[in-house]
């Protein structure tokens, strides 16, 4: 699996990449999948189940609020952090969540936000999202926030294949020592070598623009 600089350095809402950014991404991925399956508009209620560390420290790290904002269609690099508390307060006042920003559903915080004192098998940062319609469950998925804002689903966890990426980098390395050796062998600085690798995914102009945004 090839990892870009922009996989490691992310713009995201704090305070925690594992407990805040990851859960928001999980919520957003969930509603994206509902939309892809043409099930979004059949959803009437969603239940959030936070396990392990997400349950134990989730309120302090905003895991509960981050998950809900993801369900509302927000992504960590695009959301306005200053609006989060106001939007959550409004949701809790009227028990209504705008799913993916377009489908109004009932969400009763005390009923639908479940903090469970148990761990899922793969990782302590586990969460399950369940969507229900008129006739019962519409879709369910379990996600794990595995660090650095990276999120995998239950199928990825079970298969051991965390990413199907087959990108081949011109200068592949797995340690700092290998990186320095490549630089010496090819007469390149670290920044030159990293730029060459990043250009596998995007142009130099795009790379510099994204760096400046960060």
Image (cartoon, rainbow, N blue to C red):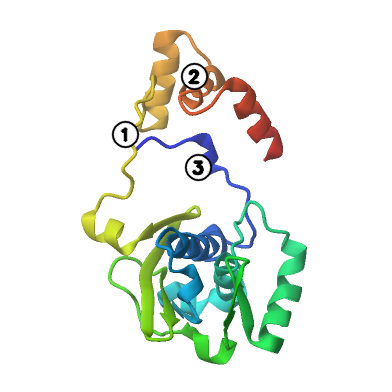
Among the 4 quarters of the image, the one containing residue 94: bottom right
Crowd class of label 1 (few under 14; some 14 to 19; many from 20; radius 10 Å)? few
Determine the secondary structure under disc 3.
helix
Residue at x-position 61% and y-position 61%? 74
The residue under the point 28% across, 71% down is 121
Of residues 62 and 164, the one nearer the viewer is 164
- Residue picked out by circle 1: 166
Q: How many marks?
A: 3
Give the residue at x 49% y 52%. Answer: 148
**Residue 92: x percent and y percent?**
67, 85
Looking at the rendered image, the quarter that the N terminus falls into is: top left
Crowding at mark 3 (Cα within 10 Å: few <14, some 14-19, many 20+): few
Q: Are marks 2 and 3 in contact (CB under 8 Å)?
A: no
Query: Could you tell me which residue is drawn at 48 percent across and 28 percent down?
Result: 201
Q: Is residue 198 above or below residue 69?
A: above
Residue 49: name its quadrant.
Answer: bottom left
Q: Badge 2 is on which residue?
A: 196
Q: Which residue is mark 3?
A: 7
Please state which of residues 214 and 25 is positioned toward the viewer in this rendering. Answer: 25
Q: Is residue 164 above or below residue 49?
A: above
Horizontal and vertical percent position of residue 67: 54, 70
**Quarter occupied by the C terminus:** top right
């Amino acid at each position: 699996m090839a990892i870009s600089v922009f996989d490691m350095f992310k713009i995201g809402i704090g305070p925690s990449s594992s407990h805040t950014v990851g859960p928001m991404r999980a919520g957003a991925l969930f509603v994206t999948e509902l939309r892809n399956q043409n099930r979004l508009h059949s959803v009437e209620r969603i239940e959030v189940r936070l396990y392990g560390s997400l349950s134990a420290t989730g309120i302090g790290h905003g895991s509960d609020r981050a998950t809900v904002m993801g369900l509302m269609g927000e992504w960590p690099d695009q959301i306005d952090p200053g609006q989060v508390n106001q939007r959550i307060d409004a949701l809790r006042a009227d028990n209504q969540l705008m799913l993916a920003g377009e489908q109004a559903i009932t969400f009763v915080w005390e009923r639908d936000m479940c903090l469970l004192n148990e761990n899922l098998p793969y990782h302590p940062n586990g969460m399950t999202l369940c969507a229900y319609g008129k006739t019962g469950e519409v879709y369910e998925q379990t996600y794990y926030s595995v660090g650095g804002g990276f999120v995998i689903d239950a199928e990825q966890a079970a298969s051991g294949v965390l990413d199907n990426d087959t990108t081949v980098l011109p200068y592949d390395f797995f340690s700092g020592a290998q990186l320095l050796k490549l630089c010496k062998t090819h007469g390149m600085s670290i920044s030159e070598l990293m730029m060459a690798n990043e250009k596998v995914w995007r142009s130099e102009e795009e790379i510099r623009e994204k760096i400046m945004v960060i």
